[in-house]
Image (tube, rainbow, N blue to C red):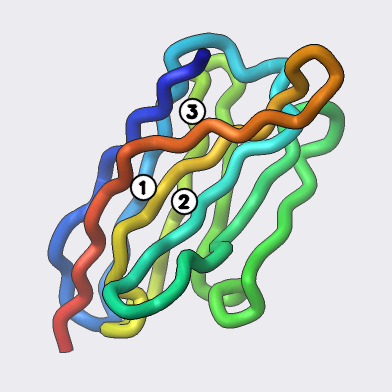
């Protein structure tokens, strides 16, 4: 089992920036990928971004965030980051870190507890 701890959330004005971090409790070098999702009140959980861990550090983003958010990783620090720029009130949500790894040949997802991001207008 791996524990994921998110940090970096908070209150920011529209147009501002935040950098989220997700620290894993053990080495991430053999994870398939890590990523971020968000859940806003009254809405379904939404994919934000993903980065591969094994092999190339290729990334994937939700279309609405591609030009404003950047995901990155530090395998040495067991950490994935999400740099969020030009934040909008509609970005307000709890942001969750996700890790995907193979366990006995099957993909397995782990989740953090989430960090609140609030963007004021």
Mark 2, secondary structure of its residue? strand
Marks 1/3 in contact by CB < 8 Å: the verdict is: no
Between the C-alphas of marks 1 and 3, the distance is 10 Å
Q: Which residue is mark 2?
A: 82
Q: CA distance from mark 2 to mark 3?
A: 10 Å
**Residue annotated with mark 1:** 20
Classify 32 as above or below 105: below
Q: Position of residue 89 (x, y in %)?
A: 27, 83
Residue at mark 1 to residue at mark 2: CA–CA distance: 5 Å
- Crowd class of label 2 (few under 14; some 14 to 19; many from 20; radius 10 Å): many
- Classify residue 72 by image quadrant: top right
Q: Is residue 17 left or right of residue 97?
A: left
Quadrant of the frame with the C terminus: bottom left
Residue at left 56%, top 27%? 74
Judge left or right: residue 12 versus residue 93: left
Q: Nearer the viewer, residue 60 or 113?
A: 113
Residue shown at 24% from the left, 82% from the top: 14
Q: Which residue is mark 3?
A: 79
- Mark found first going from the N terminus, 1 or 2: 1
Secondary structure type for disc 3: strand
| Nearest to N terminus: mark 1 or mark 3 | 1
Q: Residues within 10 Å of mark 3 (few under 14, many from 20)?
A: many
Q: Position of residue 51 (x, y in %)?
A: 68, 45
Q: For this rendering, which residue is in front, 9 or 39?
A: 39
Q: Position of residue 56 (x, y in %)?
A: 84, 36
Instruction: Tell me residue 110's x, y (percent).
Output: 53, 31
- What residue sits 46% from the left and 51% below the top? 82
> Tags 1 and 2 in contact by the CB under 8 Å rule?
yes
**Vertical order, 54 against 71 (above or below):** above
């Amino acid at each position: 089992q791996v524990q994921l701890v998110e940090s970096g959330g908070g209150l920011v004005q529209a147009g501002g920036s935040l950098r989220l971090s997700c620290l894993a409790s053990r080495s991430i070098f053999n994870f398939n990928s890590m990523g971020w999702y968000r859940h806003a009140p009254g809405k379904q959980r939404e994919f934000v971004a993903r980065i591969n861990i094994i092999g190339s550090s290729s990334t994937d983003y939700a279309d609405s965030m591609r030009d404003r958010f950047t995901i990155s990783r530090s395998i040495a620090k067991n950490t994935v980051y999400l740099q969020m720029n030009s934040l909008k009130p509609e970005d307000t949500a709890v942001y969750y870190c996700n890790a995907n790894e193979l366990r006995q040949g099957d993909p397995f997802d782990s989740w953090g507890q989430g960090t609140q991001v609030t963007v004021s207008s």
